[in-house]
Image (cartoon, grey):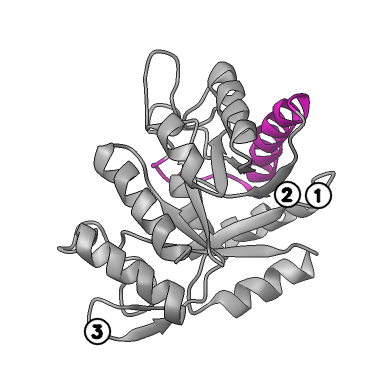
Amino acid sequence: MLMLNCDLGESYGSWKMGRDDEVMPHIDQANIACGFHGGDPLVMEKTLAMARQNNVMVGAHPAYPDLVGFGRRPMHCSAEEISAFLHYQIAALEGMAQIQGLELAYVKPHGALYNDMMSREAVRAPILRAIADFHKPVRLMLQATPEAEQHRSEAASHGIDLWFEAFADRCYDDDGKLLSRSKAGAVHTREKMLDQVKQICNEGTVTSVSGHTLELNPDTLCVHGDNDAGVAAIKEIRKIIHS
């Protein structure tokens, strides 16, 4: 059965982001910000507590060191820098999780780091090495694409298990990547989103922008709960998955 994952814990100081308390009861996996694009120690602590209360799996959501840009701006970092800032963020969240009796299960990079991981081997390789070098086994979450077997092989060479994710509300281009937000229809309407979720659940596929059927077979589905409509959509998606 598909799991639901959501990016949470991204508030910072007086800046509030998302509806974490409303989303948490309806998801399986919480991708928790580690302070580099959002989140601070108090927010991390509170988000972990909510995950514990709702029996939600905990994952680290590390980013480029880009708090001002919310981690959405690509950065030219060396492999050593990528490894170091990943370890710094993952270890911080894992340590705080252990205090609350929680285990860190996986890592899902955020924003530009995620996009660069998917498109550039020079970024993906140090991410894989950093996770392999971590003191305990954790999975890596990345996008389900036609290159899934290549990515699985790369991860296996480092002894890493993967979770592949699909996106409930995003339109897919014909190459299996997400349609650029600069193009019309990149984000689905509620009706199209729910239809795509049903197709993923029933067939493991999505229909691309040009009508091609793409086989994804994801393990988990990414959802967003930044507003009332988003929270309501998550509830509907969960009903579809469990129907």
Question: Taking the image as drawn, is residue 120 in sight?
Answer: no
Q: Quadrant of residue 50?
A: top right
Asked if labels 1 and 2 touch by Cβ distance under 8 angstroms, the answer is: yes
The mark found on residue 124 in the picture is none
Asked whether, in this view, residue 137 is left or right of residue 234, the answer is: right
89 inside magenta stretch: yes
Residue 106 vertical position relative to residue 179 in the rendered view, above or below: above
Q: Foreground mark, 1 or 3?
A: 3
**Disc 1 on helix, strand or loop?**
helix
Q: Is residue 126 magenta?
A: no
Cα–Cα gap, marks 1 and 3: 42 Å
Q: Mark 2 is on which residue type?
A: Ala
Q: What x and y, as percent, mark residue 216?
A: 48, 76
Residue 169 image point, x, y percent? 31, 59
Residue on which the image places disc 3: 211
Q: Which residue is mark 1?
A: 133
Specify the segment rendered in magenta. 72-100
Q: Secondary structure at mark 2?
A: helix
- The amino acid type found where label 3 is placed reads Gly
Identify the residue at the far right of this view.
135
Q: Is residue 97 left or right of residue 164?
A: right
The N terminus sits in image quarter: bottom right
Q: Residue furthest left?
A: 184
Secondary structure of the residue carrying numbered label 3: loop
The residue sitting at 36% across, 61% down in the picture is 168
Question: Which residue type does callout 1 highlight?
Answer: Asp
SS majority, magenta: helix
Q: Is residue 17 visible?
A: yes
Residues packed near mark 1 inside 10 Å, few (<14), some (14 to 19) or many (20 plus): few
Residue 36 image point, x, y percent:
53, 30
- Determine which of the numbered discs, if any, sits on residue 130 in the image: 2
User: CA separation, marks 3 and 2?
Assistant: 38 Å
